Image: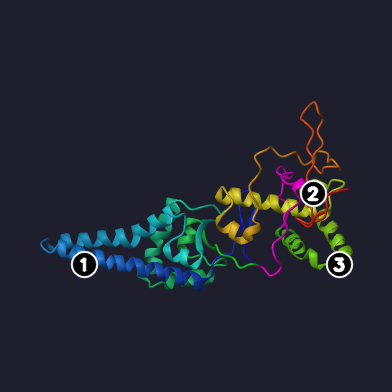
């Protein structure tokens, strides 16, 4: 699966769209735009019948630029990269860093699209997409954009489980820029399959991955925090950053990529720092009474310890 890397070195797990789906989206867009262009041309032809040939030519050129170039640019700008064809095919145009496109991106894509798609019947765009590793045409290269899939099929392994509530928001200050993509993939694969592993084997794998992740982030796993819970909490923090960085809120491609288990954004309350001591009774950061009131106990699921998230709070 291709990944986008933001300016903060956060990998967005979004799949670049392939040529067949992009071609279908462009075809749907062209059918709508050409139908509108023909209708406008017929209306203008009747309205300018009394004008001379030069005026009719000027009107024809203006209608061509307005309908076949201006309208697609306006639609992509206002919809943040989703034209009618892309919406039907589950695609979206985003920046190289995963953020929503703006007018200048749509303008460059639309201007070069006249040459790539309209004047050459899509031959240049197809060749460029086949040559590009991420399926980008020339308009995407010069505009700094990428067409990605919004609707990502659910993986057979399932989604990584959410972290336990007593670890939510504890890693907001963690530096994740040094964690390689390969380690993220290993962690996600483990979290998606940990229920299928032998408990002893799963514990060993979790401790190894947690040690690798702690070495990359420079923050060791705190005593009393299970390795699997630590991994799940850091993965959720990474997903939160992806959503905030790319879309400002949970939704769009990121939410679709993770499905209904996509995390909520950071809580309203300021989370405790990562190096704050953990209260073994409540699983929350211990704080002196002179600074803040004691943290209330976290209610545990009635169906047994860890039944809601799959993780057992520290004893």
Mark 2 is surrounded, within 10 Å at the Cα level, by few (under 14), some (14 to 19) or many (20 or more) other residues, namely some
Of pointers 3 and 1, the one earlier in the residue sequence: 1
Q: Looking at the image, which residue is at 51% across and 64% down?
A: 91
Q: Secondary structure at mark 3?
A: loop
> Is 171 placed left or right of 256 in the picture?
right
- The magenta stretch is 155-180
> Is 48 placed left or right of 221 in the picture?
left
> Is 48 placed left or right of 143 in the picture?
left
166 magenta-colored: yes
Q: Is residue 144 above or below residue 296?
A: below
Real-space Cα distance between discs 2 and 1?
70 Å
Question: Looking at the figure, which quarter contains the N terminus?
Answer: bottom right
Spot occupied by residue 185 in the image (x, y as percentages of width and height): 72, 62
Tell me the residue that label 3 is attached to.
198
Q: Is residue 299 above or below residue 160?
A: above
* The label number, if any, that marks residue 300 in the structure image: 2
Spot occupied by residue 158 in the image (x, y as percentages of width and height): 70, 65
Real-space Cα distance between discs 3 and 2?
25 Å
Is residue 13 something that shows in the picture?
Answer: no
């Amino acid at each position: 699966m291709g990944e986008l890397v933001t300016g903060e070195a956060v990998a967005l797990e979004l799949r670049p769209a392939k040529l067949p789906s992009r071609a279908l989206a462009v075809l749907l867009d062209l059918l709508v735009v050409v139908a509108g262009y023909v209708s406008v041309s017929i209306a203008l032809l009747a309205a300018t019948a009394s004008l001379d040939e030069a005026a009719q030519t000027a009107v024809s050129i203006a209608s061509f630029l307005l309908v076949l170039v201006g309208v697609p640019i306006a639609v992509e700008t206002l919809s943040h990269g989703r034209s009618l064809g892309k919406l039907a095919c589950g695609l979206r145009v985003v920046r190289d860093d995963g953020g929503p496109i703006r007018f200048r991106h749509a303008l460059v894509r639309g201007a070069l699209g006249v040459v790539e798609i309209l004047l050459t019947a899509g031959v240049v765009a197809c060749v460029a997409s086949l040559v590009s590793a991420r399926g980008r045409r020339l308009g995407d290269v010069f505009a700094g954009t990428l067409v990605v899939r919004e609707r990502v099929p659910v993986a057979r392994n399932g989604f990584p489980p959410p972290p336990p509530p007593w670890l939510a928001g504890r890693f907001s200050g963690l530096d994740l820029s040094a964690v390689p993509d390969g380690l993220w993939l290993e962690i996600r694969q483990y979290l998606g399959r940990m229920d299928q592993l032998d408990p002893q084997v799963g514990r060993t794998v979790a401790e190894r991955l947690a040690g690798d992740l702690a070495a990359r982030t420079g923050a060791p796993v705190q005593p009393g925090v299970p390795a699997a819970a630590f991994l799940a909490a850091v993965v959720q923090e990474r997903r939160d950053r992806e959503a905030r960085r790319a879309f400002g809120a949970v939704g769009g491609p990121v939410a679709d990529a993770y499905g209904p288990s996509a995390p909520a954004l950071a809580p309203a309350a300021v989370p405790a720092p990562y190096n704050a001591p953990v209260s073994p009774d409540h699983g929350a950061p211990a704080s002196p009474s002179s600074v803040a009131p004691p943290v209330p106990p976290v209610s545990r699921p009635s169906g047994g310890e860890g039944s809601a998230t799959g993780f057992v709070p520290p004893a």
